[in-house]
Image (spheres, coloured by chain):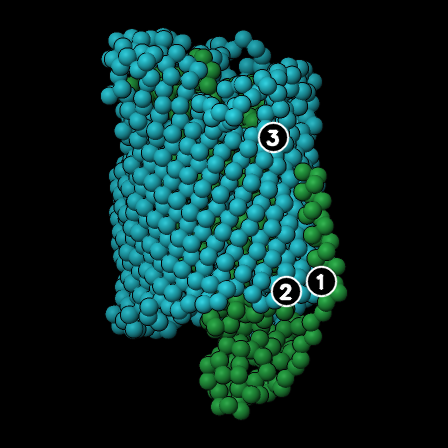
Chain colours: A green, B cyan
Amino acid sequence: MGKRLLIFLSVLFIFLLVSIAHNIVRGDSEFVGSEVCKDCHEAQYNKFTGSIHGKKAIPGNPANREGCESCHGPGAQHVEKGGGRGVAIFAFSKKESSTIRDSKCLACHEDMRGVENWNLSKHKSFLVTCHNCHSIHSPVQKKDLLKSPEPDLCFGCHRNIRAQFNKQSHHPVKEAFVGRQALKCSSCHNPMGTFDIKTMIKADSVNELCYKCHAEKRGPFAFEHMPVPENCLNCHEVHGSNHSRLLTRRVPLLCQSCHNSTGHPSRPYTNLHSFSGSATQNKNRFFGRSCLNCHGNIHGSSLSEFFVR
Amino acid sequence: MKAEIIVVAMMICLVPLSNAFPQDNKTIEGEVGVTGVWIDVHGKEGGKAKFTEYRDLREDGAVFGWARLNLDTDKYFLNFDAGDFAYDTQYYKVNGGMWGKFKFDLFYDEIPHNITFDARTPFIGAGHDLLIGAPNPNFPAWNTFDHSILRHQYGGGFKVDVIRPFFLDVSFERENRDGIKPIGAAETSPGGRAFELPEPVEYVTNNLKVAAGYAKNPIFLSLNYIYSDFNNSNTALSLPPNFNITNEPHALSLPPDNTYQKGAFKGAVSLPFNSRFSTNMGFSRGRSETSIVSLISSGYTGKVDTLNYDFALTSNPVRFLDAKVYYKYYKRDNKSDDPTGVANIFLNYRISTYGADLGLRLPESFYLSGGYKYVKTERNKRGESDPAEILPFNMDNIFFVDLKWSGFDFLDARVGYEKLDRDAHYRTLDSALNSAKRFFYAAQNKDTVKAAVDLFPLENLNFGLEYRYKKIGYSDTLFGLRNTLFGLRSDKRHEFNISADYMIGKIAKVYGYGDYGWIKFKQEQTAGTVPWEGDQWDKTWGYGIGAEVYIIPKKLTLVFQHDYLKSNGSVDFTADPTVLPPGLFVAANGLGPGSGANNDNIDIGRWDDYALYSFRIRAVYSFTKSIAAMIGYAYERFWYSDAQLNNYIFAPTGPPASNAAFLTGAYKDQSYKAHLIFGGMSYKF
């Protein structure tokens, strides 16, 4: 461990040293002004001026700088060549690399709260750009200039997560009877990146995230059930499950994934132990809520090391 | 309740303030609307609750109203959004401020979680912290109540922008949760009668968040503080005197009051070579107190500290290279009171993670990324004295590689593979020999394969296809040999998802999706009298199709949506025939004498089986640009069948009598069928 850490720190140090010694200088070109852009792109111009980017009251906004050219770059050559999509202008097309497209937005937004870790984002690693989710000129949702509202926006790419939310036990993310939405993907995830690089959750651990809404599970309990404080995901799915309470597996098999000892924890609870089964003995370890019929305080208890009180 | 009324009143009072705004480029737009719903639900108590699980559709009819107002000037903005007035899903949101100066928001939000209506208990006092009465099997005469919880959240916050590049964000929210949920209790363990009881839920949680810092390229600095306190009005559920408990107190403990504080620092600095260094450090302390502790006469004080610090350096020095290196550390320290004899239940752990990712832009529009991550988890149970129960350390080696190709404008394709190799280091010989190796710390091998294709063959046609395969094998190496253990042995999954949408000129938009999921868990038990294996399957498939047809453009639109989802779960049990031949199961097995159990009739065929069918159609007619009317019909059907809940008995009696149970009916009879007819009007301005 110590050796590996030393290597890691050495690499980090060398990289920082080389980085600091280097600088990039960029040249400027000629700007023509937004009014010139309006001559050909009136619809886009009007949407821009009516949007948050067109507010002059916001310091550093494109409206206070080069207007359209703040993002699209100097337009003199574009005008000289008679226009055309991508002709001597930055058009945010797929031909431009995702890094360059993002850099146009990050030039202003990199120091914005919530975006400061875009460099860590899994989205960035998968070449997802700002424009995959945001639309500057035609947002469907004005707030955050989203292309479509959550969760549909996220489900567009995360099809397996959409399938999980369709399952009978799920967090109320897709519940919207008359435009209401209780919980959003962004309630738990920051798509702009966090230090949880893979899942981009808005917390330093899974449990810390879950406890934000489930504070009663936080404890600390006098009697802890060991898998609970380590990771809620030992027993629960996050987005959706076929089993009630978002359990990964059905009780008692979930409990029997860990518990084995002589006596009832190890016995096979089968179809015969159901309400309509023929084996009546030990029924209360299978039917109803099974193990939880007795071990109700499974997240922790103040009274029982077996979580029965 | 007073606080809730104040928040809502404040929000409503703020709306007329819009008139006070200056007239420069003032834009006001909004919408008000109302929708009436007639509901016809067929189902039992569980089904009616399932139908309205996160909704408020319990009555035969409902009228939902909503209102939205957006005001925007060159300097100010104000937005108001509210709906579902007077229902358990009502919400009110106001946000506003001065562009570039400050922002504020206020909100009030409700959402129910309905589990089972008309649940039963032989006791009196459901919803309170004192249960009285005697358990009896005459369940038709039991008292009824609802397993249902309602969350009310309200609060607000403000952000100060005028001090840029410095910033200050403050927010506060309170959540009240009220209702009843099921909780199990036993007189003794092991054995004894089981009681499913109505747990009173009267929680109040207050959360305060403050963030202040400096944000101006190339530097981002932020100090964050969170304070959260959770208060439970009921620290215990007092049980009836005839509840056969030998140890005092005569109660079931409920979640204790707790507080949580966290201070954190986040920082980032942009460096040359398109590089950025980021850090995140935090310290938290959680505390709880309760006087209901059996082993400590003076009560119990819980204290858990966590510490984390993370560093990352990312760089995109040249166009074709993305690089990332990171280190993370997380520690949990349980410093709670040490009740005599139970100290080993306190879990402490440290997780150290470091890794590096590399992304390469290759010729022909290929992008190759890959990485390595090493995670070391060190657990210990405070005060553990049994060498067999000393928890192991885990060392995870994780490799991943992804290849993306976007050579055509109309196609993106991606394949990826991830390998996790977890080693469990048992620190004592006894713990290595102990068969009790829980799956979440046992050695494991995990392989994940992903493949996805996104096609855009036409400008208005999108088509996506995705496949995932995951296999986790749990095993432990003992003296170089793979050892057969108990518990979860493997977890294997296939997921297949497809989606498409097509805009047919200005005539219609059609869309659809299809999903298939296959999960198999394999587990076994060796410690009991009858060694057994169980293969648990979940097979889920579903589809959805929908269309928006613009019959008269900008006038009449027809919207149609149909979804179907079916899940088939099962468990295939196999008892070891070398120990007990099939057909000769005896009482010691837990299967019961004379049950006739054998490997052919013990399998579970109904294991959270369900089918969800829904169909919705609505027509929207716009009389003018401002006024629109809508009428529609929806049909929902949920069919549910499960071995544990079918043919439900509230008071199974055993034998033996010590195995009797008194249940509330939680989650029983969840099937339902519902017709909804709805119509409404909206006005935009």
Q: Earlier in the sequence, mark 3 or mark 2?
A: 2
Q: Residue at x 32, y 23 (%)?
A: B573
Between B448 and B679, the one lying in front of the other is: B448
Is B225 located above or below residue B136 in the figure? below
Identify which amino acid the numbered label 1 is placed on: Ser
Which image quadrant for residue A73? bottom right
Please give left or right for residue B476 compared with residue B383 in the image. Answer: left
User: What's the chain of the residue with tag 1?
Assistant: A
Q: Which residue is mark 3?
A: B393
Within 10 Å of disc 2 (Cα), the crowding (few <14, some 14-19, many 20+) is: some
Residue B375 appears in the picture as rendered:
yes
Identify which amino acid the numbered label 3 is placed on: Phe
User: Do callouts 1 and 3 point to residues on the same chain?
Assistant: no
Identify which amino acid the numbered label 2 is placed on: Pro
Q: Which residue is mark 1?
A: A19
> x, y (%) of residue B226?
67, 45
